[in-house]
Amino acid sequence: MATVTRSLPTPPELTGRWVQVFEESEVRPRILEVADRFPELRSLELPFGRIEAADTPLADALLERPEEVLPAGVQAMRELVPVGGTGAETEGLRLRITGLPVEARRQVRAIRESDLQKFLALEGIVRKATEVRPQIRDAVFVCTACHTEIHELQDEIAPVLREPVECPGCQKSSGKVPFRLHPERSTYIDTQRIEIQENPEKLKGGAHPQGLSVLLTEDLTGKVLPGNRVTVNGTLKSLQRASASRVGVLRSTTFDLILFANSVEQQQKEYEELAIPEEDLQLIRRFQGDPHVVDQIVLSLAPTIKGMEDEKEAIALQMFGGVGKLHPDGVRVRGDIHILLVGDPGTAKSQLLRYVAEVAPRGIYTSGKGATAAGLTAAAVKDDFAGGRWVLEAGMLVLADGGMAIIDELDKMTPEDRSAMHEALEQQTVSVAKAGITATLNARCPVLAAANPKWGRFNPEKFISEQIDLPPTLLSRFDVIYSIQDRPNREKDRLLAGRILQTHKEAGYPGPDLGLPTSTGAPFPPKFLREYIAYARQNVNPVLSDEALRFLEDFYVKVRSRGEEPNSPVPITARQLEALVRLSEAAARARLSPVVSILDAQRATVIVQKFLDRITPPNEKLDIDVVTTGVPHSQRERIDLLQDTIRRLQEEGGGSFALEDLIAAAEKLGLTRKQVESNFQLLRNQGEVIEPRTGRWQLTRF
């Protein structure tokens, strides 16, 4: 049986130059190590800078003609392996180039036709990822007439199998005699397709992020998940669009782009892609240890929104965040701070959130009206991108990994969609088990959310849990919850109106420059504030001092002691202590201090104390159950008293009771008619009482 093999030639002069590069770069021992450890290890990673230092023309040729230069580099690797190492060990060697220069880096939206067939580096977030599947690379066909074996190399990116044009044995074309594919004798490689999306911090003016398909092969597959931030280096290729019709396949003149990956670099450090000019770095370092810098940052946060200083201070610390910790037993404690703002209409919550989304180095904004569980976390979808297979697609919280997620109108989401946030808020992961795909994705980001009261405006006499249409299990995962109430006050209203009107006056009119002043009076402009936050998060990891530790401990024990009295509610729990630690670390990080001082701890306790005061109605004791369970201690006592009274009335009334009798009996025990009616309605909603006949009630569990 005759065998015909077709392969691409490798220019000998390029191979020799690659050998010299390997020798000068002293990477020959690494090549031998890769060959010895094959197939566990099959790729040599080589920084582009080494190639450029050893042979600048070769480095330039690599960027311009990668499909010609890279195979020569692989051939040079094989020649450096000893003679005894032939076979699969040498055939499977691969050369991975990393660290491409600035001139080879592109944004997805900046790619043009001149970039085709060039070696490029693209940065972005992995938005989709298919399963790893084998793809035929060297297809073996058998001629049914003369039984000649024909090896046909396949195009890496083409979705259609390419058959031989004619048989070299009997000289018959494919139209005269069919060729039969021999799957067992063909060779395959692992392939995976991903789609990367532009980093949100690189977008300007709210532009929609664009994406690009990437083909991963061999040992590059199975190493990235949706939400990972990567830099993909590879050759940009085009793929012709085609559609089926009655007359056959119609080929379009428009081509799709795909990047044939040579290497993938995962970005581990946060905010490393945010370039900070040297003069700004020097200015940032001048604020190290400044005790007033936090106040200046608060003044710089949405300066046109007057008031809300407490909320701005908490949000400012949230953008810096605490320090995440990994305990020896593998338990991870988050350092990110979650904040919920619940306020009356017209209190500028949405404007504040929009500003934070622009200032945060990686802020992603969405509204609860248009968000679903899949859009927030992750989804398994069928997509032509994967040939009709199921694809894992990252949602907002996954794409915000390492950044900041901002959700407006949280109360407008459906309960089913909101329930998907529980894991992301506490464990900071998103677990997916859909359509046979099981994965756990990272969602390490602080969440800033806003909502409106259930009935439009707050009633200061009621507990906050009664007025927010959010489940207690979700509320308890927020470190700080601020209720923003709009109450008329002549002095404050005049001051606020004057500031707002002055802002409108200074803003001038759209159009030509009228020479009007536009300064907002903010100490830090948005660009500098963005750079300051990125620098602090990347370079400062503060540690609690002994003084700060004792201060937080004393504060926690002092507040907890209020619950030691008989029938007293639990004031705070260990969750609030962890929130105090995170806020203290954030305050120290904002000062660029490596140590958390007692001043940072004091700032944290003030924020938490204000949060606790706002969730407690007047004349009520501090009760953290308002947030953690949704039912305050005093209400539980009234419900217990009401149930005992109902049981007594049922025994006296032959198994049922009238509502008016219950109200009269409860009033004698100190409950008001309004309290009885509201708690009785709660028992009805929970199915604790039923009405077997008109006007008569009874407990379902007597």
Image (cartoon, helix red, strand yellow):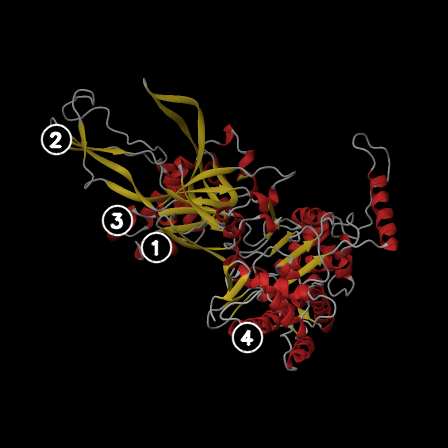
| Mark 2 closeness class: few <14, some 14–19, many ≥20 residues within 10 Å | some
Left or right: residue 488 versus residue 677 is right
Q: Residue 41: which disc?
A: 1
Mark 3 touches mark 1? (CB < 8 Å): no
Q: Which one is in front in this view, the residue at disc 2 or the one at disc 1? A: 2
State which tag comes first along the sequence, 2 or 4: 2
Tag 4: residue type? Arg
State which tag comes first along the sequence, 2 or 1: 1
Tag 3: residue type? Ala
Q: Name the residue under label 4.
A: 648
Q: Name the residue under label 3.
A: 88
State which tag comes first along the sequence, 3 or 4: 3
State the CA–CA distance, disc 3 to disc 1: 12 Å
Disc 3 secondary structure class: helix
Q: In which quarter of the image is the N terminus?
A: top left
State which tag comes first along the sequence, 1 or 4: 1
Disc 1 secondary structure class: loop
Camera-side residue of 700 and 337: 700
State the CA–CA distance, disc 2 to disc 4: 96 Å
